[in-house]
Structure formats: C-alpha cells, structure tokens
Amino acid sequence: MSNYAARLGQPASGKRRIKDLLNQPDNRVCADCSAPDPKWASANIGVFICLKCCGVHRSLGTHISKVLSVTLDEWSDEEVDSMIEIGGNASANSIYEAFVPEGSSKPGPDVSHDQRMRFIRSKYELQEFLKPSLRITSGKCSSTKKPSFRKSTLSTKFMDSFRANSSSKKIFEEGMVEFIGLLKVTVKKGTNLAIRDMMSSDPYVVLNLGKQKLQTTVVNSNLNPIWNQELMLSVPESYGPVKLQVYDYDTFSADDIMGEAELDIQPLITSAMAFGDPEMFGDMQIGKWLKSHDNPLIDDSIINIVDGKVKQEVQIKLQNVECGELELEMEWLPLEQ
C-alpha cells in the first residue's frame, strides 16, 4: 500500500481501479459538458465530471448526486465498486441521455452557469431524457404537475435495474438462462368475457415468459370468472413482456381463443430495483405504467410499496376479441426472498 493510499485509509487497489476507469477514452471528458480532463465524479450516478459541473451536482444534494474528488477525497470500497459496475460516462449517458429532445442540446464547456444548471437538473433530477417507462415517480401528481422523485431514484441500484452486465446483480441459472428475480402474478377475475360455447364459456388464463408457460384452473360456464390464483414466473436477465392469453376449454376439440394481451413488466422491475429493500419504506407509490394507445391498459397502472412488498394492480382490456377484461396483481420478488 502506498503512503498516500494509507493516509486515505483506502487500499491502493481501489485507487488504481478508479484511475484505470478514468483513463478510458469516454471518461477523459466531462459526462455533462465534455470539458477535458475531469477530476471529479458522482459516485452514485457513476460519471466523471469537471469542476464547473461538479458545483451544479453538489447543489442537487447528495440524495441525487454524491460528488467526490478523484484524487483528494476518500472513497469507500462500495463507491469504487459502484463506479466500476456502472462503467463510466458512456454507459451512464446511454441511459440518462437516451432521449434528449430537440431544443435541449448538450452544453459545451463554456456555457453559462444557468444553461449548465438547466441541463444537469433535467438530466438527473427530473430525468427528462430517460425512456419514459424508466422514470420513477412517487406520490400522486396531476397531469399539470411535474412528478416528484424519491431520494434513492438515482442510486446505483437504479442503474443496476437496467444494466445487463452489472457485476453486482444477483442471479441464478437454469441451463444457460440467467434470472434476476421472480414475478408473482395473481390472476384475480375476468369481466364480460367472450362467448365461445352456446351461451357461455369455460375460461382459463395462460401466461408465457420466455420458455415458461403457466395457466390457471378452468372456471366452468362463467363469463365473469373469479380465479384469485397465483402464478410464479422466473424473470430472465433479458426479459420481454409477459404474454397473456385467455382460452375457452373444450373437451372434444381445440380450445378457442378468448383474447390476449402483453404485460410490460419493465416499470415494475425498474421501480422495485430503484428503491432496494421495500421493507425500509412505508406504504407509498413508487412508479406507474401509463395507459397508451399501444397497450391494453384500461387506466394507468400504479406501482406501490404495500406492507413491505412491491405490487402493481393491473386492469386490462383483452385484445383481438369482441369483449372482455381482466384484473391482475403483479408482485416483484428479488432472489433473496
């Protein structure tokens, strides 16, 4: 251990790791204004920044950006690991600047303080350049008010939620497939389902995720069935939507389709990972899957922490069918549980 590293109370290997990361080409300029030779970093966001941008980051508060000097400050092992896991400026900017709208160009090294402040706040505090489904909101807000954000929104856990190569991500393996957690889907009930027999139907629900296929029990002769049945799916690292289908059971012929839908589980997983251990929080809203013309939602689907669990109520209108709605609840279970 060098004398300097010993004086900081930090192993020399940690300093070397940060220096090696800083020397990568994309980290040799400021993540926010491209000024050369940055000497500061936001340890929880995972970017290297210049002195001018450093001042703006500090004004945001440590709950959004924890600023450290690359050369002068003491770094904990956890902070070093977080920077390494995120990978630096290019990796972080691929998320935080994924959708910079027209008219919101990235500032240069010599912009005014006000321009620098507006861009950095939009990028990290307001999250205006993220993919919409990754924006984390808490509390109730109307369409005319900006959403509020929890302190942990910009934590490294938030980055881990959509970084596929995060080395700290806990996984388990089944063959060659890696999983990041479990999804418990409670199929509650159906309403006004389509008729596929003479006067009624015998409906059941099928869920597909990857190669997994689960189904509920059959409810005989009922267009408003109540299942309240839990189905558990393992969520792979590279996951897509959960595909849902409703069928009418037939004894002597192929089962008839009664509608289908796709459930976007990214908002639930992203919100859950952003907040970490839900038992540390009281009951609160932490996210939302927004209704749009290209999804089956009847209304916005709210993601809440309830009794220390991350849950999402979902009401959908079945697609490619004359009628029918389903009510479900999804719950995210990290592998530790």
Image (tube, rainbow, N blue to C red):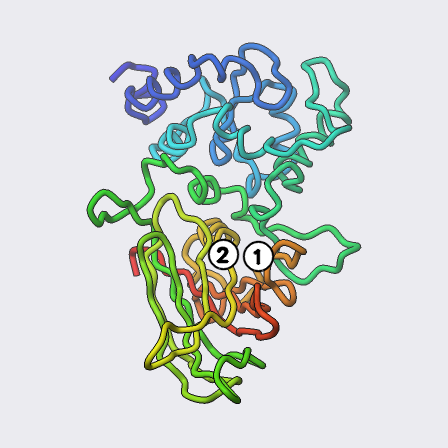
Count of numbered badges drawn on the protein: 2
* In this picture, residue 250 sits left or right of residue 295: left
Q: Note whether residue 151 is visible.
A: yes
16 or 260: nearer the eye? 260
* Residue at point 71%, 32% (across, down): 101
Which element carries disc 2, helix, strand or loop? helix
The kind of secondary structure element at disc 1 is strand
Give how far across and how far down residue 109 sits, in percent: 67, 14
Above or below — where is 270 with respect to 304? above
Q: Which residue is drawn at 67% across and 56% down?
A: 293
- Which residue carries the number 2 mark? 268
Looking at the rendered image, the quarter that the N terminus falls into is: top left
Whether residue 37 is situated above or below residue 89 in the rendered picture: above
Q: Which amino acid does label 1 sit on?
A: Gly
Q: Establish if 51 lies above or below 270.
A: above
- The residue where tag 1 is placed is 287
Report the front residue among 173 and 8.
Answer: 173
Instruction: Kindly give the residue lying farthest to the top in the view shown.
Output: 36
Sequence-first tag of 2 and 1: 2
Q: Are marks 2 and 1 in contact (CB under 8 Å)?
A: yes
Q: Position of residue 43 (x, y in %)?
A: 47, 31
- Give me the disc on residue 138: none
**Residue extending furthest toward the left:** 175
- What crowding class fits label 1: few (fewer than 14 Cα within 10 Å), some (14-19), or many (20 or more)? many
Closest to the observer, 195 or 166? 195
Percent of width and height locating residue 102? 75, 29
For disc 2, the neighbor class at 10 Å (few under 14, some 14 to 19, many from 20) is many
203 or 299: nearer the eye?
Answer: 203
Given the image, on which type of amino acid does mark 2 rest? Leu
Which residue is found at the position 55% from the left and 28% from the top? Answer: 93
Residue at image point 42% right, 12% down: 23
| Quarter of the image where one finds residue 244 | bottom left
